[in-house]
Amino acid sequence: MGFSSKVGHPPDYQSPIGALLLSLAHFVQISEDFYQHLPRSGPSGFLETASLTHPSFKHALQYLARSHTRENRMRKLICIAVLVCTISMLGMAQETPKPEIYGGYQFTRTDGGWHASGWDTAANMYITPWLGATADFSGVYGSGSNLYTYTFGPVVSTHKSSFSPFAHALFGGAHTAAGSLSEGGMAMMFGGGADFGKRKLVFRAVQFDWMVLRFSGVSDKNNMRVNTGFLYRF
């Protein structure tokens, strides 16, 4: 019943499965044609003769000479390339995501009780379906002071459905200023969040980061930031 409904319709060789079957068919035909011209084994299991003048070897060499035209060589190379590419595509569970950019609102709280609001922006570039690199820049302002961070690091995410959780570890620098005084230091962030949506414009419901700041040789480890905004996937 399943086969009768497909009578008269040629197979779709543009699909990965069709390309794979077509390549295998070419490969099997080439192997069978060549095998027919090879010398046969005797009762002992070894070749009847090792002489290059044996008629079977002559037939094999003649076959190779006929088949090694430019057209046949190109056809075989194309079949092999299609086979390798098809197997690679079938073995991929998921294609590598395209670059992403994020922008949104950020709330920051430091160990000393300072609260500030501002912005955060980031860009993601993936090298595998789940592993990529992030560049993150943020700035917050409150009570006459400000804090800027610029960090970079790896990100791990999944894009299989409309729910895409992620985690990252970011390392870089920080700059703070209050009035006429300013100071530069280091920043480290460890956290993650969740994106919702399958279209190019995705909603980042939440992003939470534990933030370590270091100024004048003193590390402050009890800081945090929370983000929400939108992510655009190219």
Image (cartoon, rainbow, N blue to C red):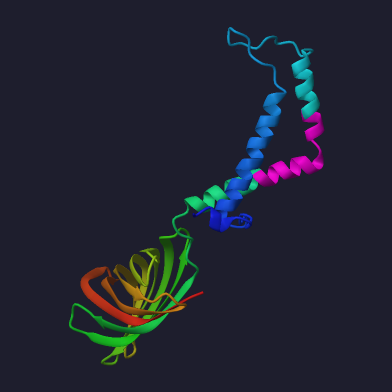
Left or right of residue 87: residue 155: left
| Picture layout, residue 133 above or below residue 140 | above
Q: For residue 73: magenta?
A: yes
Q: Position of residue 159 (x, y in %)?
A: 40, 66
Nearer to the camera, 57 or 98: 57
| Residue lying at 39% horizontally and 76% vertically, measured from the top left | 197
Report the number of numbered marks.
0
What residue occupies the far top of the structure in this picture? Answer: 44
Give the magenta-colored segment's residue range: 64-79
| Residue lying at 48% horizontally and 60% vertically, measured from the top left | 95
| Picture layout, residue 59 above or below residue 191 | above
Q: Position of residue 115 (x, y in %)?
A: 23, 86
Left or right of residue 149: residue 79: right
Q: Position of residue 232 (x, y in %)?
A: 46, 78
Nearer to the camera, 6 or 209: 6
| Residue lying at 59% horizontally and 46% vertically, measured from the top left | 21
| Residue lying at 31% horizontally and 88% vertically, measured from the top left | 141
| Picture layout, residue 205 above or below residue 26 | below
Q: Picture quarter containing residue 226? A: bottom left
Q: Picture quarter containing residue 222? A: bottom left
Nearer to the camera, 146 or 39: 39
The secondary structure making up most of the magenta span is helix
Q: Picture quarter containing residue 41? A: top right
| Picture layout, residue 122 above or below residue 72 | below
Q: Position of residue 5 (x, y in %)?
A: 54, 58
Left or right of residue 196: residue 93: right
Q: For residue 95: magenta?
A: no
